Image (cartoon, rainbow, N blue to C red):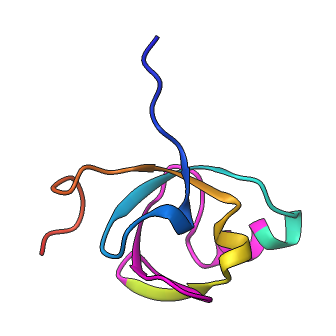
Amino acid sequence: MNTIEQVPLNELSPSQCGVVCRITALDDEIERLMAMGVCVDRVIELVQCGDPLILRVFGTRIGVSARLADRILVHPCRPTHCYSR
């Protein structure tokens, strides 16, 4: 069986992107994330590590706490898969 690696968002490297596969947060936190464009099957890019982490979603930068980022699981993308540099 071929499984795709899932890692917490805060384990990506800066400039690396991933596809959100699961969010294990409280309902109100999930609603806030969805309002900012972070939802399952969405491609997001980690711009900057820290607390908060800076993400790029649909070309917009948003901040997410490190605690919450640990609850967002992503499939890391190949380096040439997503955003053009």
39 inside magenta stretch: yes
> How far from the left and from the top, in percent, is residue 35?
66, 76
User: Which residue is situated farthest in the top direction here?
Assistant: 1
- Quadrant of the rendered structure where residue 66 is? bottom right
> How far from the left and from the top, in percent, is residue 79?
20, 57
| In this view, 25 is above or below 81 | below
Judge from the rendering whether residue 22 lies leftward or rightward of residue 16; answer left or right.
right
> How far from the left and from the top, in percent, is residue 85?
12, 75
Judge from the rendering whether residue 82 lies leftward or rightward of residue 51; answer left or right.
left
- Which range is magenta? 30-59
* Residue at x 67%, y 64% (from the top left corner): 70
* Residue at x 21%, y 52% (from the top left corner): 81
33 inside magenta stretch: yes
Task: Pick whichever, 60 or 26, lies toward us.
Answer: 26
> How far from the left and from the top, in percent, is residue 58?
39, 75
Q: How many marks?
A: 0
- Quadrant of the rendered structure where residue 23 is? bottom right
* Residue at x 41%, y 57% (from the top left corner): 18
| In this view, 25 is above or below 54 | above
* Residue at x 60%, y 79% (from the top left corner): 36
- Quadrant of the rendered structure where residue 52 is? bottom right
Task: Pick whichever, 66 or 18, lies toward us.
Answer: 66
